[in-house]
Image (spheres, helix red, strand yellow):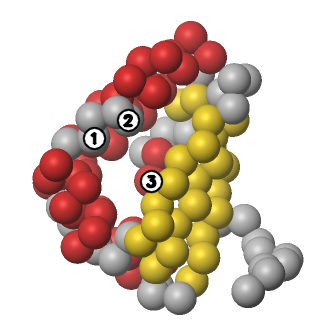
Amino acid sequence: MQRVCFLLRVRRDRLDEYRERHTAVWPDMLAALSGAGWRNYSLFLREDGLLVGYLETEDFDRARAAMAETEVNARWQAEMSGFFEELDGAGPDEAMRPLTEVFHLA
């Protein structure tokens, strides 16, 4: 199982709305994530907008590619892209750059 952690930055003026959107993630989006192999997926948001994401999957590149093929992900990414800083023209999923794991206590 591959453990993946990534960072993004949410715009400070949209923190409350970002939190609200994640209290009711679309059921078809949740099903797509599960179907693509995303497990134990969590998002943590700091008050300054730092977003830390964590997930487990067999193959992150394959799981991300599977999501990219879904219609619901295209809709979700289009709606969510305005919440983030520093995407440099990429969608939020494309801007995810996994951090290198340097320690894990099993």
Disc ID at residue 25: 1
The residue mark sitting in front, 3 or 1, is 1
The numbered mark, 2 or 3, whose residue comes first in the sequence reads 2
Disc 2 to disc 1, C-alpha distance? 5 Å
Quarter of image, res 103: bottom right
- Horizontally, is 41 left or right of 103 in the view? left
Is 9 rendered above or below residue 106?
above
Q: Residue at x 58, y 61 (%)?
A: 54
Q: Residue at x 14, y 52 (%)?
A: 28
The amino acid at mark 1 is Val
Q: Find residue 96 and report its horizontal and vertical position in percent.
A: 56, 56
Quarter of image, res 66: bottom left
Q: Nearer the viewer, residue 88 or 9?
A: 9
Disc 2 to disc 3, C-alpha distance? 16 Å
The amino acid at mark 2 is His
Instruction: Return the residue at label 2.
Output: 22
Instruction: Return the residue at label 3.
Output: 93
Is 71 rendered above or below residue 69?
above
For mark 1, does the 10 Å Cα neighbourhood hold few (<14), some (14 to 19), or many (20 or more) residues? few
On-image quarter of the C terminus: bottom right
Q: Secondary structure at mark 2?
A: loop
Q: Secondary structure at mark 1?
A: loop
Q: Find residue 90 and report its horizontal and vertical position in percent.
A: 48, 45
